[in-house]
Amino acid sequence: MRNHIVLCVALALLGCGADEAEKEKKYTEREAAAKLRFEQWAYVVKEKQIAPGETIKLVIIPDSQGFDFQDTKCLIYTNAEYKQSSMICPDADKESLKASEE
């Protein structure tokens, strides 16, 4: 009986090591993906023509820490007739923009 308990505990400990290794591997993969995403920097998510000659684009600037929910979102409005564009980033803060410049 005692041997069965020792065997069960040993098997449980071996299984935990495998789980930890798998968690570490997934964490490393997520960290590498976040770093690559930040290095590739800003990208256009959507673009829509809202009227003839007028477009609006949603641009994402990835967070330097890799957190999707902290990405900076910007809108770019372009008017081809007047050759004008404007960009607003309502949720931008100085720290996120400063980190993206480095």
Image (tube, rainbow, N blue to C red):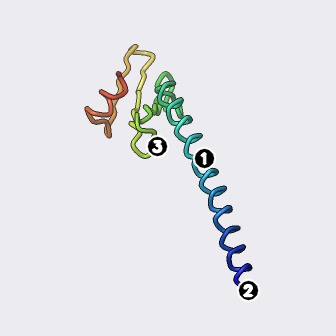
First in residue order: circle 2 vs circle 3: 2
> x%, y% of residue 63?
41, 36
> Which element type, helix, strand or loop, lies under badge 1?
helix
Q: Name the amino acid type tagged 1.
A: Lys
Q: From this viewpoint, which residue is outermost toward the front?
A: 2
Apparent side of residue 94 relative to residue 26 in the rendered image (left or right): left
> Which element type, helix, strand or loop, lies under badge 2?
loop
Question: Which quadrant would the N terminus be assigned to in this image?
Answer: bottom right
Apparent side of residue 19 relative to residue 32 in the rendered image (left or right): right
Residue carrying label 3: 68
Q: Quadrant of residue 88?
A: top left
Rounded to the nearest whole Å, what is the CA distance between mark 2 and mark 3? 52 Å
> x%, y% of residue 82?
38, 15
Residue carrying label 1: 26
> x%, y% of residue 36?
53, 29
Q: Name the amino acid type tagged 2.
A: Met
Q: Which mark is residue 1?
A: 2
Q: Name the amino acid type tagged 3.
A: Asp
